Amino acid sequence: MDRMKGSARLMIVSDLDHTMVDHHDPENLSLLRFNALWEAKYREDSLLVFSTGRSLTLYKELRKEKPMLTPDITIMSVGTEITYGNSMTPDDGWVEILNQKWDKKIVLVEASKHPELTLQPETEQRPHKVSFYIKKDKAAEVTKALSECFVKHGLDVKIIYSGGIDLDILPQGAGKGQALAYLLKTLRAKGKLPKNTLACGDSGNDAELFSIPEVYGVMVSNAQEELLQWHAANAKDNPNIIHATERCAGGIIQAIGHFNLGPNISPRDVTDLSDTNLEKFDPAYEVVKFYLFFERWRRAEAEKSEIYLSNLKAVCGPCGFYVHPSGFEKPLHDCVDALRQCYGDKQGKHYRIWVDQVFSTQVSSDIWIVRFKKWEISGEEQSGCLTTALLSSKDASISQGLTWLQVHQTWLTGASASDQALWFF
Ligand code: GLC
Ligand code: MG
């Protein structure tokens, strides 16, 4: 978050399972729509925070399975672990706060006296989180008994029931809401309090996110009963919290529009990508748009028209070069010609492209360097490369868009494509 000099325009704090990520959509369309919107319109001046119940181990698994963006801040294990940036540097100050009136050993011993509780896998047992599974009809009774018993031991704990199955025991000062409050306090102290914050969730452990003052909230349409009940009892008159009519990331986009937090039309929802009223040259939008066209071309969702190819040639500098991640180089115009052959080669197949962490730097009055990760999923295989592109606005009008002068790619660790000949741009 230190990459930004001032306050974020928008900070999105989102749960992952069944909120950002729709496990019932094998095509991941709402997530991909969100990704395109975020990278085109928000990445440079806004903050993306993932707040999940998962431990680092399970979080990494999810990232391998789903086309997820890289967040600026990650809050894991139900608000007990906060990390920053790509290096995931832990916030040690937060850990200290959680040690108060907490004793994991006592929690484990007392919980083991309740046969209704089944311990979750070892990866989900964390220094400040002990987690079980329990059936819905037993949850309230066991929660009550445990709470009374922990008070007798002088502990101050919080018991949270989520998804109609998971029971987490945490220090009282932990949880997704407290972690968000701590984050806001830290940002405020640095003079970087976001202009707007939007919390997004679907289940019990997300309820706390919606009780932080001055934060907008969206419960996605598919929210769990326990969250809706909490809302009805505690926040039903709060106009800053909505229950979306759209599922998962679709509900997040809907909330951005509802609360007027900024652009809310994903480039993925725009059919004619040339028809945009840009006010200035916009390298991030250019990158998102370019790869969307590419995906549509290969899926045969764009019309097979020479006009597209000649337009593309017009925005590729005549002397421009493409450096393939495996090392060879070829003129950009040859790359455009190669596209002719691959029209529709992914039609009806599982094939998607998305870009992550698109950052641009204006290096002179008419030149930008844009850096981003370009990912492709093709069938079962996911490949990605770090991309640097040099874009120019020389002799171009805003509506024509920027010219691509050079594109240089390097495989991301462990993510090279098995058929490198089929990797373009
Ligand atoms: C995630 C975690 C699990 C936790 C649940 C609810 O599924 O892996 O340990 O109980 O979220 O917070
Ligand atoms: Mg969830």
Image: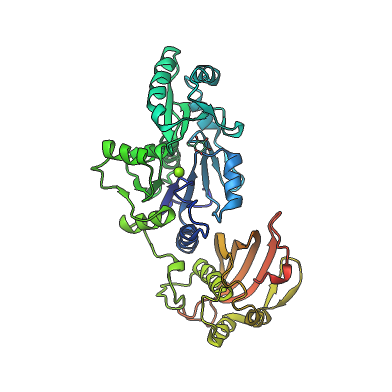
Does 51 sit above or below residue 249? above
Residue 261 quadrant: bottom left
**Taking the image as four quarters, which one is ligand 2 found in?**
top left
- Residue shown at 35%/48% (left/top)? 218
- Residue shown at 71%/54% (left/top)? 414
Q: Nearer the viewer, residue 368 or 256?
A: 256
Residue 83 quadrant: top right
Residue 185 quadrant: top left
> Residue 100's spot in the image, x, y percent?
48, 21
Q: Nearer the viewer, residue 295 or 2?
A: 295
The figure's colour scheme reads: rainbow
- Quadrant showing the C terminus: bottom right
> Residue 65's spot in the image, x, y percent?
59, 52
Q: Is residue 208 left or right of residue 297?
A: left
- Residue shown at 63%/62% (left/top)? 379
Does 272 sit above or below residue 14? below
- Residue shown at 62%/45% (left/top)? 87
Does 88 sit above or below residue 425? above
Does residue 208 appear in the picture of this structure? yes
**Number of marks in the rendered image:** 0
Does residue 185 appear in the picture of this structure? no
> Residue 349's spot in the image, x, y percent?
59, 68
Q: Residue furthest top?
A: 152
Q: Residue furthest left?
A: 237
> Residue 96's spot in the image, x, y percent?
52, 27
